[in-house]
Image (spheres, helix red, strand yellow):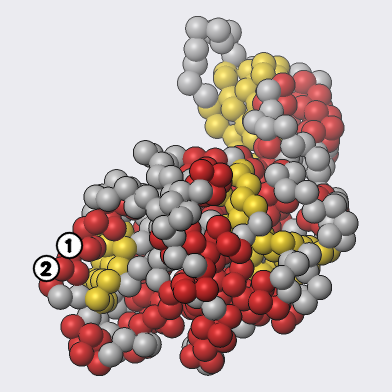
Amino acid sequence: MSDGRVTGESAPPASDVVTADDVADAHERLDGVVHRTPLDSSRTIADRCGAERVDLKLENVQRTGSFKIRGAYNAMAQLPESVRERGVVASSAGNHAQGVALAGDLLGIDTTIVVPEITPAVKIDATRGYGADVVVEGDLYEESYEHALRLADEEGLEFVHPFDDAAVIAGQGTVGREIAADAPDADTVLVSIGGGGLISGIATAMKARDPDVRVVGVQPEGAAHAKPSLEADEIRMLSEVDTVAEGIADARLLERTFAVVRDRVDDVVSVDDTDLAVAATVLAERAKTVAEPAGAAPVAALLSGAVDVEGERVAAVVSGGNVGLSEHAELTRVGMQVLGRAVEARLELDGWPAVLGDLSEAVADAGAELDSVERAARTAADAPNRVPVEIRLDGSGPDHLAEALDSLSALDGVDVVSHSLDKPAGESTESFESS
């Protein structure tokens, strides 16, 4: 496999890759096919990051649960009939898969999708639901990508690239066209970066309307390839990726996206996986919307302070919401703990289950919620005549949870041995009281 290295000198001009006119054409082509997704204001997030206003572009409520249908349909709708008859193949960690599958269903084109083993089952099931043939191949996306290229060559299929394709980029750019129309005074737009197709399209559309708008990319620290590439003025490929955000777990930009990102994106910042968990939690609780980790990355950048937007009008693209319920529950469990809204504690009880009634009543009297309680595996440190128990409490903040734990300690037959407030999972324990 080629390392895909392209230097600044050899990269094509961004104007040769995609233009605002291309995005306008895509907008017409997608009329009646995709939803015009809402731009929802969040006072909570604005207050937390110091912005004058934060608008959330909710592509997680788009058809297929992400923006990917825009680029996939725009590209596939332009294929000649002879190519359509043979069918298409694509590689994806999930969202592009669903976009290609739905586009194929709408256009009457047979689709084969190659996905890596890390792809969530919810995305695989949804892709098959649109009629695609799904092939699971490779530990990483790059391996799935290479397998899809082999299938294209061996079976005469048209390969639909997830991001390094002018028509795909133009289709994704319709997100930016909508933001520019709905929030024409935006100072900064935040967009997740995986392979760079979405931000390339959005930057193209928005810079054409307002050259002064700042477009900032956001990547997880475990897949942060764009910033090093821009600083080196050549594509840099990661040897491995490690992030919960599988939707943007790409190892590099490619020729077209590198050219456009270099020319039209103002900055790229990184967030860690804990930041993503916090963002997904805040989006669920305050914005009442479900975001997958990749879709939550722009909000994570705002909440973590990775980008300075003091006094600005900001648009953050929530690019996808395809996440399994159990995975989302785990994310929000972490997020709640980092925010100081949840505590895990180990107790020793005089009896089981005799004391549980008093324990539950004390938690309720304290205004907290007993999220879970279970007997714990006994260790050598546990008193032989006591029952070790692990509980999780939810509350409004660290002080509230500390008071709830104190009320438990005051009960006869209950000792609080340890709890996670002594060793928080993250530094951000500011509660979100506003909505």
Kindly tell me whether residue 1 is visible in this rendering: yes
Q: Is residue 126 above or below residue 171?
A: above
* Residue at (63, 23) in percent of width and height: 346
The disc labelled 2 sits on which kind of residue? Answer: Glu
Identify the disc placed on residue 154.
Answer: 2
* Residue at (81, 44) in percent of width and height: 431
| In-image side of 210 versus 381 (left or right) | right
The disc labelled 1 sits on which kind of residue? Answer: Arg
* Residue at (66, 77) in percent of width and height: 208
Q: Residues within 10 Å of mark 2 (few under 14, many from 20)?
A: few
Which residue is at the front of the view, 431 or 46? Answer: 46
Q: Residues within 10 Å of mark 1 (few under 14, many from 20)?
A: some
Quarter occupied by the C terminus: bottom right
Callout 2–callout 1 Cβ contact below 8 Å: yes
Which residue is at the front of the view, 255 or 133? Answer: 255
Q: Is residue 184 above or below residue 80?
A: above
| In-image side of 307 versus 72 (left or right) | right
Secondary structure type for disc 1: helix
The residue identified by callout 1 is 150
Secondary structure type for disc 2: helix
Which residue is at the front of the view, 225 or 194? Answer: 225
Q: Position of residue 348 (x, y in %)?
A: 63, 18
Q: Position of residue 65 (x, y in %)?
A: 51, 70
